[in-house]
């Protein structure tokens, strides 16, 4: 499939500069793009790659236009417009409607006739798969779950119990939604399991990464607002609430009953303590531990900077000695 | 199912105050409980919710009794007694005995006739599933494994090889027990894999979280004592030994051959180095790195506190400068 | 299977001392070895176990020879030579060639007749399984993937799309290779998904741990060189490149487009920021955050040392106060 550069600009509603008739049939990095491919410059650190770039055209900020000799799509947000352009060339075949004969579906589950149910899938009692949804191979859906319209469980996803997923959600392999939260009480020297009876609610347009876990609520639900984006290997405890448009990078962990605002950015490996609240538009840097509520938008951090180990050891010894210093 | 409040108090062996005849048919949070539901106050920070609470009754510490106007179950440990009360209303249907026709069972595996084997399960040579055990959909059990009486692998659990699970254990989806430990030796510029031949032994009443991994021992076994509770996304290396009643929150990692005592509490994201020992009744705070043995009970920490990023940057620069300070 | 000690020394090409005729039929730890088993001393901290050790022979460094009274294999690298010896006794049965009838294979996938395909496996369009490869139960292989000669996916592994695995690679259960990278752009207050179209290339002799994730590249590929060893629960972002013979312990995370050299050792829980480069032969200690490129071989660290919590609290308060200190 090929498109004229001018047509791409028109579809995206952005400006262009140069030969509008160039034929583009896909996207690529600056380093690897050929004459029929569209590249992009979003991060100025890659500006030097423009010199030898063989792309047919480049999505670029007007301020950088002078660094690129060829045709250009001009954008105030080159990464986003490149993403929109790339989507025009996405040729992934839609999964066909229908149910693989190896799938095991409960009698009282409801599967829309336009949904795709892959090989070796199980779907439990009273669960519902809506129109256009795709349940990839090896997924296990328990009881009382909903997979909304046009949502996709890629493969080997578990929805354990009472998980309700909105529309156009993508869940990557190995993710586990609706497992019991970690609720324990000590009684006479042994742990008692606190029954976990709540559900999980995932808003429209969310994306859940591979091997990420979102526990069901203890009594009420665990809730993700719309357009929340979770990377891989994340742990979301029971009764957590995450506001719309918040994004979390890989390996973050959020303890039970924490409430995170909208439009937050949580970098990789960060930890968020239980029962705290984080305001809207908070950024947390990588591997930071958030131990108390954050009331104001802004960027927050913990940890120490990277050092050669022999220097770090001396700083670390002196960190211990800070314990002896008077607070004056 | 409904129970009189007075009957609940009697079953739990705790005191009550108010109308013993109230009918209770379930549990809920203070915020959402209705007149036929039982709430609880365990964390004083939620005391204010008692004012507008519509619960039929509340489990509460005698010292907090004055803050709640309605009927109460009086408890020195409200969270535990609430958990015990909630269990009285747990209506999850037991999985029926029998084997799904899609399950693939080795000829010399032994499955008790009262066990439940779900769809798309594999069970390998010489493995044994004991009475009342539940093997949920998509589980893969390898060779020489045992799943003890009334234990439950929820779904998509892997027991790789030589994993012996005790009675009443719950293993959540995506958990992997008995994969090879990370044993490598460098030889002539290449890694040699050190054969991993040991097993995993899980004591009675343990709970293993979603996507948690427990590696098989290299030569001897990796061992969890009874009533050990592991949250999600935890990594337990080969030959680790964890004492009875220890609990670990999500995303902890324990390196090979570490030995952790009984009744320890390891908070989320903590790391424990290999070949060290931790005494009984040690608490480790969130995201702490334990690099040496801990001989005394108590609470241990590492890391730095949360700060606004601009302030943190200055502290971080000065942490690096501590490297130059004399030890005086 | 039993071997004479002298024959073992000869096969390994190392020296021995004592009775060459002793029959050895397996390996064990110093603490548990019996008279027909071979033990080893690699870590001097276990030297004291030699006193009561009942092993038939021990692999030991010549400098430690005096501490062990019995027959010995003498080695400059006892751990590696023990591993090589252990491999001689590895009796794991090879998986038989053939395809389980429950496997679902795309019409245009190619499976070598010597490969083993387990129960409940799915293999997608245009994928290829080469000679001697083993695809264990519950694996899901998507489209356009290759599993190279004699490689083994133990069980419940996902290869999502365009994943090409070399020869003799082992992938442990729950691993997810080729899921979409975390590519997002904000556009008019909502996230746009940046199409992820690249693949994953895994070199020969790699090992990928349980529940580890390696994302597909956004446009180009994510690449692991030969003999890279990844432990469990690791997250590798899109377009990361890892050099040959590098090893990473459990729970590490590498953000997108980072480039890691050869022969690096990344300890458990370490984090590596995106778009940076790490030289060859760099060691990163446990739970360190690498935020900028490392140009020189050596050992690098961040974090603070373990302390009793009451002392740590005082140091932590003073760390915050470092923010006020002048840089002088």
Image (cartoon, coloured by chain):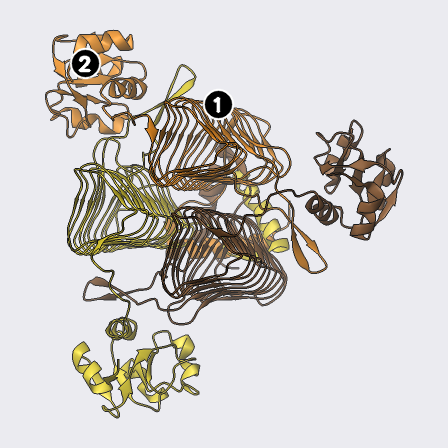
Chain colours: A orange, B brown, C yellow
| Residue at (26% x, 16% y) in the render | A61
The image quarter containing residue B260 is bottom right
Q: Is residue A205 left or right of residue B93?
A: left
Disc 1 sits on a residue from what chain? A
Give the percent coordinates (x, y) of residue C96: 23, 60
Q: Residues within 10 Å of mark 1 (few under 14, many from 20)?
A: many
Q: Residues within 10 Å of mark 2 (few under 14, many from 20)?
A: many
Question: Does the rendering let one see residue B64?
Answer: no
Q: Is residue C87 above or below residue C245?
A: below
Q: Quadrant of the N terminus of chain A?
A: top left
| Residue at (31% x, 67% y) in the render | B195
Q: Is residue B200 above or below residue A299?
A: below
Q: Earlier in the sequence, mark 1 or mark 2?
A: 2
Give the percent coordinates (x, y) of residue A164: 51, 29
Q: Which residue is mark 1?
A: A226
Q: Is residue B41 left or right of residue B250?
A: right
Q: Is residue B87 left or right of residue B163?
A: right
Give the percent coordinates (x, y) of residue B276: 48, 66
Query: Residue A72: which disc?
Result: 2
Question: Does the rendering let one see residue A291?
Answer: yes
Point out the frontmost of discs 1 and 2: 1
SS for callout 1? loop
């Amino acid at each position: 499939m090929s498109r004229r550069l001018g047509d791409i600009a028109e579809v995206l509603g952005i400006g262009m500069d140069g030969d509008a008739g160039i034929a583009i049939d896909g996207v690529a990095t600056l380093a690897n793009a050929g004459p029929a491919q569209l590249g992009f410059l979003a991060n100025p650190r890659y500006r030097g790659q423009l010199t030898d770039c063989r792309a047919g055209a480049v999505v670029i900020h007007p301020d950088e236009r002078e660094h690129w000799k060829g045709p250009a799509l001009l954008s105030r947000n080159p990464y986003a417009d490149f993403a929109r352009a790339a989507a025009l060339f996405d040729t992934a075949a839609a999964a066909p409607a229908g149910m693989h004969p190896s799938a095991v579906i409960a009698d009282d589950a409801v599967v829309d006739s336009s949904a795709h149910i892959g090989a070796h899938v199980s779907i439990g009692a009273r669960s519902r798969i809506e129109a256009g949804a795709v349940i990839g191979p090896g997924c296990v859906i328990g009881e009382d779950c909903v997979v909304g319209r046009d949502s996709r469980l890629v493969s080997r996803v578990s929805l354990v119990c009472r998980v309700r997923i909105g529309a156009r959600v993508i869940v990557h392999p190995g993710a586990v939604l609706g497992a019991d939260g970690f609720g324990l009480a000590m009684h006479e020297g042994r742990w008692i399991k606190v029954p976990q009876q709540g559900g999980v609610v995932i808003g429209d347009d969310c994306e859940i990464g591979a091997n990420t876990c979102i526990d069901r609520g203890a009594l009420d639900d665990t809730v993700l607002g719309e357009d929340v984006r979770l990377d891989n290997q994340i742990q979301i405890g029971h009764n957590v609430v995450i506001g719309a448009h918040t994004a979390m990078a890989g390996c973050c962990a959020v303890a039970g009953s924490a409430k995170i605002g909208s439009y937050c950015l949580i970098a990789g490996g960060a930890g968020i303590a239980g029962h705290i609240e984080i305001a809207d538009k908070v950024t947390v840097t990588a591997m930071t531990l958030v131990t108390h509520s954050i009331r104001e938008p802004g960027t927050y951090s913990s940890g120490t900077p990277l050092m050669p180990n022999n220097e770090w050891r001396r700083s670390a010894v002196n960190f211990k000695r800070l314990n002896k210093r008077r607070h004056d």
